[in-house]
């Protein structure tokens, strides 16, 4: 079938104009062993940008796919960064090359918290779906899902020395989990509203939580396993039933509460913040010596954690004062020894406040050994600010060291324009107008302006003109970056502006119900010197009955189309301004319109979500199309074609054919309402602006679009999405409790299961062929030619069918393996078990095979044990796996002992330490030696 009309695909080329998105946090990272505190990572829509704050440059982009990044957490070694996304996916990127190494799929909605353990081997994630999942980073799989919270998780923290986890949520509870038994052993109910953040301090003996009020609550953690530390003999811990009466009548010790297991957590006091609103984020530096906290305003509060020796000194000082006071009151008599209570304010001192230039979205801080504190702030107006602070000073004040503003607008860009040579792109927002180089995506000029609603390049591309919300026209010179002139044009907002086709002037339409015509003029000015400067001369005015929303010339300059607030579009003759046509049919005002290059068609987009195509000869409506799920904000024809693009509040950009009234393609990517777009004069590029503060560049490729195939692909995508959202497979015999499997059914797991089933089918077919061939050879009494090998096996290098099955299982992602095996129907399991037996015997991928085997035995235990045919296979597996696993463990143990021996040999020869903590050990020895020397000096 021949193509009657060829359409070319537009693909996403770049995202720019966004410095940091509001959905994700900010985090300090280290690149290639560089200095600490120089690079910050922020979410930028679906990507993650790494900024060099010193040079204000973007140094690395971690590419996302479809969904916004919502949380970032660098690994303890600084080599990787874990990124959580809005769809519940977690990806781990390498900071050395920006590649995505590991992906985890377990949550059903946005990830709200990520934390590594001290070694970086485990990862805990919390989500809006109220689940907490612990992942094994090394094995690339989920360990378990912890259920118990009733609202979104706000923070999850590992304890360094104990296998415990603490989580906070918007359900006002803080829960403690024992990861050995995977259950919640303690729930703290001391908060009246949502717990928005928490940090562990004082060697994890103090928990600080931030809630919806101005109080930071401190909790004293006492670990009950260390009975001597608690101050109670170990015998009291295990009580018999006979002790009940005594326990009820006597005083209860701290350990005798049946709920007090593993640890006790009591309120130790509170610190009052200056902010009266809720805590947005509460963070501490990696060594937990400084705590940073902020609310929804622009004030950051910094607290210093006082060392234990200084706290004791303070208390002794207070005790001394109290004794002196008591002695003076008693008049020299015997006074009772006063008691001084230890307060949280003794442990947590206010450092200073930092006033940011706008509301703060997120904060991260890093403390250096010399006492210098670096603070990075992500603001809500698309800005990053960094501050330096010396914590050793008495009245420390934060000094601003850098501010990243150049690469984006503070508010949404409401108007875009392309230069005539397709190179420069103009974007204007509520306070600035920027001109970008399309090829490098770098800012060429930034100029302060009023709230801009429409814009255009003056012919020659040396000046630009803006129409503002206050009704003014502003003319800027690009060479000098200066404002040439501001003219009062309309009494209300200047909604639309259009260049005349003869390029001698412009027409403007505003909320004062007028359309005004302006001509370009060059005048001599006192400021401009001998050179003339551009100005606008008002020539004509058209008075109308309603506010003007959009104006457009027809390319032959014969007609002028004006969209009015009464939902109609009026067509006037340009020369006489006489009325020609009225286009009515939209139910809500027409927000945008455009006329095709041959002046034959006019397309109108309305707030009623429809696009109508009209003929300009008689004003007849050719077709009305339901275009978007929300208001159509912008519409423009591709130059020299009858194809046009529309942008809607539904976050989509769509391309249409005005001749065939066909939807050609949808450009998805924006995460907020799309306000406007601009098409280059060549038609090769489209740039769009959105409420997510990003500008996106789309490029026309040479790839043709076949509409039938596009529709088929859309249907397939919808089907796959519904397949992934189906009911979760149930594991037989497992009851729903606090701990569940971590995996989630997705389209990838379904596809992986299908691939395994196809491989097993191929194995069965090939086995059947071999058996038939063997029987035929025996019947004929001679060797017959072998049967034809399956083409798939030939493509994989003539491998055996059993090896092909193993290759298919190996290619399944480690994080998706269990869920893929869970989907497999039981009839495939006997073949798989016999194959596993042969793999173990040959020593092929023993670790992977054992993992699959144990999982299948657990979920199909009932059916396998009741099947007598599998008895011999299971018995063989038992003996083979035990012996093979023992062999592998022996090899690993031997290798480990050999490496340790080599390490000791090299260290003894060269007198050097191998590991990074050698310097720490040296410093510790030095400290101990000094302490000993001081002790000796005091004795002598």
Image: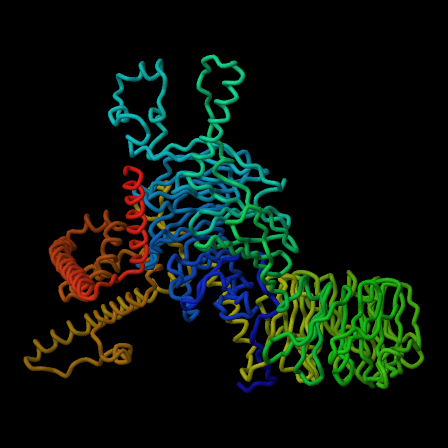
Q: Which residue does the image show at 52% across and 75% down from the upper left? A: 709
Residue 752: image quadrant is bottom left
Against 520, residue 222 (above or below) is: above
Rendered location of residue 571, percent (x, y): 86, 74
Residue 789: image quadrant is bottom left
Q: What count of labels does the image hold?
A: 0
Rendered location of residue 302, percent (x, y): 55, 47
Q: Is residue 424 left or right of residue 802?
A: right
Judge by depth and name the residue closer to the eye, 830 or 312: 312
Question: Which of the image's four quarters has the C terminus?
Answer: top left
Q: Is residue 755 left or right of residue 169?
A: left
> What's the image's color scheme?
rainbow
Q: Which residue does the image show at 48% across and 52% down from the upper left? A: 371
Against 483, residue 352 (above or below) is: above
Q: Which residue does the image show at 71% across and 65% down from the upper left? A: 429
Q: Which residue does the image show at 7% across and 76% down from the upper left? A: 778
Q: Is residue 725 visible?
A: no
Q: Is residue 928 left or right of residue 697?
A: left
Against 149, residue 926 (above or below) is: below
Judge by depth and name the residue closer to the eye, 56 or 361: 56
Rendered location of residue 148, percent (x, y): 42, 40
Q: Is residue 841 visible?
A: yes
Outermost residue to the front: 940
Q: Is residue 854 left or right of residue 108?
A: left
Judge by depth and name the residue closer to the eye, 206 or 107: 206
Rendered location of residue 814, percent (x, y): 32, 61
Judge by depth and name the residue closer to the eye, 497 or 798: 497
């Amino acid at each position: 079938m021949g193509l009657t009309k060829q359409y070319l695909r537009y693909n996403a080329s770049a995202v720019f104009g966004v410095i940091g998105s509001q959905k994700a946090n900010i985090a300090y990272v280290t690149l290639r062993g560089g200095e600490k505190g120089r690079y910050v990572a922020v979410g930028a829509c679906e990507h993650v940008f790494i900024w060099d704050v010193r040079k204000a440059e973007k140094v690395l982009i971690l590419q996302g796919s479809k969904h916004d990044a919502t949380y970032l957490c660098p690994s303890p070694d600084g080599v990787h960064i874990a990124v959580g996304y809005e769809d519940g996916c977690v990806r781990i990127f390498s900071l050395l090359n920006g590649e995505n190494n590991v992906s985890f799929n377990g949550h059903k909605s946005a990830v709200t918290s990520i934390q590594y353990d001290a070694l970086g081997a485990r990862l805990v994630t919390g989500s809006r779906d109220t689940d907490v999942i612990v992942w094994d980073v090394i094995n690339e799989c989920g360990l378990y899902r912890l259920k118990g919270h009733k609202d979104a998780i706000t923070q999850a923290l590992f304890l360094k020395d104990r296998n415990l986890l603490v989580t906070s949520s918007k359900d006002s509870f803080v829960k403690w989990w024992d990861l050995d038994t995977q259950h919640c052993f303690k729930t703290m109910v001391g908060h009246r509203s949502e717990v928005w953040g928490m940090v562990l301090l004082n060697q994890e003996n103090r928990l600080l939580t931030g809630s919806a009020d101005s109080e930071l609550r401190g909790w004293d953690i006492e670990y009950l396993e260390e009975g001597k530390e608690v101050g109670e003999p170990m015998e009291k811990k295990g009580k018999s039933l006979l002790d009940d009466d005594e326990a009820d009548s006597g005083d209860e010790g701290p350990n005798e509460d049946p709920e007090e297991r593993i640890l006790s957590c009591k309120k130790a006091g509170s610190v009052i913040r200056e902010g009266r609103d809720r805590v947005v984020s509460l963070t501490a530096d990696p060594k937990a010596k400084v705590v940073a906290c902020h609310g929804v305003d622009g004030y950051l509060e910094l607290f210093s954690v006082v060392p234990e020796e200084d706290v004791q000194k303070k208390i002794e000082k207070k005790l001394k004062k109290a004794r002196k006071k008591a002695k003076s009151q008693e008049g020299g008599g015997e006074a009772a020894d006063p008691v001084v209570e230890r307060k949280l304010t003794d442990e947590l001192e206010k450092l200073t406040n930092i006033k940011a230039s706008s509301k703060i979205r997120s904060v991260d801080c890093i403390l250096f050994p010399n006492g210098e504190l670096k603070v990075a702030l992500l603001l809500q107006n698309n800005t990053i600010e960094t501050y330096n602070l010396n914590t050793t000073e008495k009245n420390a004040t934060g000094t601003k060291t850098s501010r990243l503003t150049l690469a984006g607008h503070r508010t949404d860009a409401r108007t875009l324009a392309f230069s005539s040579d397709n190179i420069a792109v103009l974007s204007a927002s509520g306070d600035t107008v920027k001109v970008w180089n399309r090829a490098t995506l770098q800012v060429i000029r930034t100029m302060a302006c009023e709230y801009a609603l429409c814009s255009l390049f003056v012919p020659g591309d040396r000046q630009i003109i803006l129409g503002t919300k206050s009704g003014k026209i502003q003319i800027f010179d690009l060479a000098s970056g200066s404002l040439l002139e501001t003219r009062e044009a309309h009494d209300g907002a200047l909604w639309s502006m259009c260049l005349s086709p003869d390029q001698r002037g412009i027409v403007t339409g505003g909320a004062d119900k007028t359309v005004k015509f302006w001509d370009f003029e060059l005048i001599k000015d006192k400021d401009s010197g001998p050179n003339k400067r551009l100005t606008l001369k008002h020539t004509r005015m058209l008075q109308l009955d309603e506010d003007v929303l959009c104006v457009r010339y027809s390319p032959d300059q014969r007609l002028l189309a004006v969209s009015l607030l009464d939902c109609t579009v009026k067509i006037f003759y340009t020369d006489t301004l006489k009325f020609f046509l009225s286009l009515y049919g939209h139910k809500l005002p027409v927000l945008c319109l455009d006329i095709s290059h041959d002046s034959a068609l006019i397309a109108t987009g309305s707030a009623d979500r429809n696009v109508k195509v009209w003929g300009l000869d008689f004003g007849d409506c050719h077709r009305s199309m339901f275009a978007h799920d929300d208001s159509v904000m912008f519409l423009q024809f591709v130059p020299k074609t009858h194809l046009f693009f529309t942008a809607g509040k539904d976050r989509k950009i769509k391309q249409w054919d005005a001749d065939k009234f066909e939807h050609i393609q949808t450009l998805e990517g924006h995460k907020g309402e799309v306000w406007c777009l601009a098409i280059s004069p060549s038609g090769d590029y489209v740039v769009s602006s959105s409420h997510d503060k990003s500008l996106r560049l789309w490029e026309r490729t040479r790839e043709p679009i076949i509409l039938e195939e596009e529709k088929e692909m859309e249907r397939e995508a919808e089907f796959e999405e519904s397949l992934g959202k189906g009911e979760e497979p149930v594991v037989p015999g497992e009851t729903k409790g606090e701990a569940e499997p971590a995996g989630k059914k997705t389209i990838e797991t379904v596809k992986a299961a299908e691939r395994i089933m196809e491989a097993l089918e191929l194995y069965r077919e090939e086995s059947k062929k071999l058996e038939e061939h063997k029987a035929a050879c025996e019947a004929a009494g001679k060797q017959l030619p072998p049967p034809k090998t399956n083409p798939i096996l030939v493509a994989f290098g003539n491998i055996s069918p059993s090896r092909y099955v193993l290759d298919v299982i190996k290619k399944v992602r480690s994080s998706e393996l269990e869920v893929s095996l869970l989907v497999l129907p039981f009839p495939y399991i006997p073949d798989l078990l016999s194959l596993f037996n042969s793999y173990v015997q040959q020593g092929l991928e023993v670790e992977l095979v054992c993992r699959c085997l144990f999982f299948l035995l657990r979920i199909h235990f009932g059916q396998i044990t009741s099947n007598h045919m599998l008895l011999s296979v299971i018995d063989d597996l038992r003996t083979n796996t035990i012996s093979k696993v023992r062999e592998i463990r022996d090899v690993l143990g031997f290798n480990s002992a050999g490496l340790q021996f080599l390490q000791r040999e090299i260290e003894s020869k060269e007198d050097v330490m191998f590991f990074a903590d050698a310097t720490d050990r040296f410093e510790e020895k030095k400290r101990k030696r000094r302490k000993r020397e001081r002790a000796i000096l005091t004795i002598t």
